[in-house]
Amino acid sequence: NLGNVMQTHFTDTQLEDPQLREADSILRKCVHCGFCTATCPTYVMTGDERDSPRGRIWMMRELLESPDSVSSDTGYHLDRCLGCLACTTTCPSGVDYHHLIEIGRERMDKIVSRPAGDRMMRWLLARVIPYAGRFRVMMQLGRIGKLFSPLLPASMRAALAKLPSRVPALDRVGGKTMHFKPRTSSTRRVILLAGCAQRALDPGINASTIRVLNKLGVEVTVRQEAACCGALAHHIGESKAAHQTVRAALLAWREELERGDVDAIIANASGCGTMVKDYAHMVGDDPELGAIARQVSGLARDITEVIADLPLESIIDKAPEGRGTITYHSACSLQHGQKIHDLPIRLLREAGFEVRQPLEPHLCCGSAGVYNILQPEMADGLRQRKLDNIARAGAPMVAAGNIGCIQQLDGDIPVRHTIQYIDWASGGPPPVQG
């Protein structure tokens, strides 16, 4: 019944809290229709209503209205949410589940203390992965750590299992402030978020991004201080670390914007793009950062959005026989978080590729930031489900727009970033060697 809206019972005193007022407004939009359950990866895997958006919404209403009655079981099911936002794509009522789950998790953390091992893992992840140099050192040490894996706690074993076996050279892009100018006169200038984990995992993504933009006459600026978007720390409850990271990025970008002539702030990791586009909501009321946060969110673009407005056909090398077949994996943060799904497919086709889509393209691959470390059993099940669907698509290569998905799925069928395939089609190096 689409007219049966959720009733809430917050007291007047509770509604003096801006966060609870926001939650109340979101909760009242839910009509219990259940459309979200069909697209929720965790519900599809378990069939448990508590692992669905609708079930979690009911639990969050109880958590926020009557915190004294809440148990750790609520936190268990809130933590199992991937934050993939597939539910927001299918919700007919416009429920802002994205911000509701953030409020719910923050409140839950204040009510029920996590086990010591979980707290330590979250603290560690927030202080290693957002720093490319530290993360690379951890990957190198991880190869030694795997030798002692049977002796380690389950959470540490899961983390070590997710580390790649090959450790590439650290991406120089983002190591210091840089300006990459095209050989011809530039027509536009953009700021590129170089990223954190991506710089340690695959330096080729930023290299391809800069090459393609320069060929299209776009000058690219990278600020050293904007080393991370803050998403990882924000989503695992490390709020102080997240705020410090966001503040550093905003202040650095404000300096660039004051120079003028910035057409866009680009993210080539879709999880980062979703976060940056949400800065206006996250810190929009901050006296120091509010104005610049709103400006940055307004300028934030995924790399494919920027390329779509440029003459891509002018730089593509002609390939009369085509460049082969690619399966396109649509990252959740891109298709659900930023509502961009068809655009990368169109660009790949313009670059000469035949593009296929796997079955269940709306379902998450299980990466979801560090979800695959914190919730390895669920993440591994979703990974295998996605890999099976990719194999059925029958293409020898996979394109994706997010480093987390790329690392989660790369294997027998190579997975590379969409921009790396476009770079290849315009004269750059092949993304898949051999």
Image (spheres, rainbow, N blue to C red):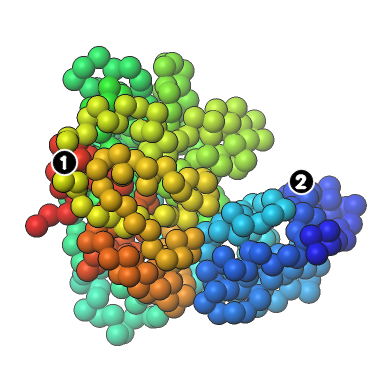
| Total marks in image | 2
User: Image height check: is 95 above or below 392?
Assistant: above
Where residue 175 sits: x, y (%)?
Answer: 27, 38
User: Image height check: is 54 above or below 272?
Assistant: below
Query: Of 97 and 40, which appears nearest the observer?
Result: 40
User: Image height check: is 203 above or below 146?
Assistant: above
Query: Residues at badges 2 and 1 in contact (C-beta under 8 Å)?
Result: no
Q: Quadrant of residue 317?
A: top left
Q: Is residue 67 visible?
A: no
Where residue 89 sits: x, y (%)?
Answer: 59, 54
- What's the residue at 17%, 36% (across, down)? 318
In the image: residue 329, left or right of residue 61:
left
Q: Amino acid at mark 2?
A: Pro
Residue that carries the numbered disc 2 in the rendered image: 18
In the image: residue 54, left or right of residue 267:
right
Q: Amino acid at mark 1?
A: Pro
Residue that carries the numbered disc 1 in the rendered image: 320
* Circle 1 residues within 10 Å: few <14, some 14–19, many ≥20: few
- What's the residue at 64%, 30% (across, down)? 287
Marks 2 and 1, how far apart in space? Answer: 59 Å
Where residue 168 sits: x, y (%)?
Answer: 18, 54
Q: Residue furthest right?
A: 12
Where residue 196 sits: x, y (%)?
Answer: 35, 48
Q: Quadrant of residue 57?
A: bottom right
- What's the residue at 84%, 54% (across, down)? 14
Q: Residue furthest front?
A: 320
* Circle 2 residues within 10 Å: few <14, some 14–19, many ≥20: few
